[in-house]
Amino acid sequence: MIIEFINGKNLEEVLDEHEGFLPEKDIVEWALQICDALIYLHSQKPTPIIFRDMKLGNVMVDQNGQVRLVDLGIVEAYHAGREQKAVGTVGYSPPEQYVGYTDARSDIYALGVTLHHLLTRRDPRQEQKRKDDHFTFHD
């Protein structure tokens, strides 16, 4: 196995190390790059690939400002109507993912939550734990 070294930080580290709110222009640039990566995954033929764990900790930004999706451990090929193991991160994952159903829309939902976290500094994991603490998803 070969793993590429990414000289950078994940977005959770970037947010934690920055005082106040991050510049919106940076967040927009990262969002566009993440969308490009998701478009690539979702357009794979014959079977789209679903990331299923979009969150700050799984997006790295290198020294050149290029975004990379990391931790592909729960990525899965999409098969319509097939129930999958309920995995993901509480707060970031969409409700249907909690019961084992995902498709490209699940990644889009999680991207929206990720961007909301970057823009507001409100951690969705904390919000979700207040609502429902019985899920066994990972942080």
Image: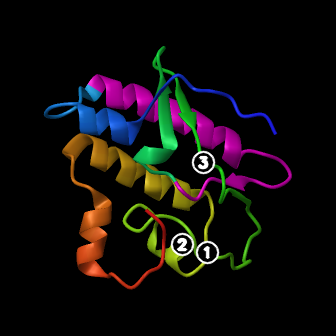
Say whether marks 1 and 3 touch (CB < 8 Å): no
Q: Which residue is mark 1?
A: 101
Of residues 120 and 62, the one nearer the viewer is 62
Let me know if residue 43 is in the magenta part: yes
- Is 12 situated left or right of 75 in this image? left
Q: Residues within 10 Å of mark 3 (few under 14, many from 20)?
A: few
Residue 31: image location, x then y, percent: 43, 35
Vertical relation: 20 (above or below) 122: above
Task: Please tell me which of labels 1 and 3 falls first in the chain.
Answer: 3
Q: Quadrant of residue 131?
A: bottom left
Judged from the image, the secondary structure of the residue bearing numbered disc 2 is helix
- The magenta segment is 25-53
In this rendered view, identify the residue nearer to me: 72 or 39: 72
Which amino acid lies under the numbered mark 1 shown in the image of this protein?
Answer: Tyr
Quarter in which the N terminus is drawn? top right
N-terminal label among 3 and 2: 3
Residue at image coords 48%, 67%: 138
Cα distance in 3D space between marks 3 and 2? 18 Å
Look at mark 3 in the image and give the residue it sits on. 71
Of badges 1 and 3, the one in the foreground is: 3
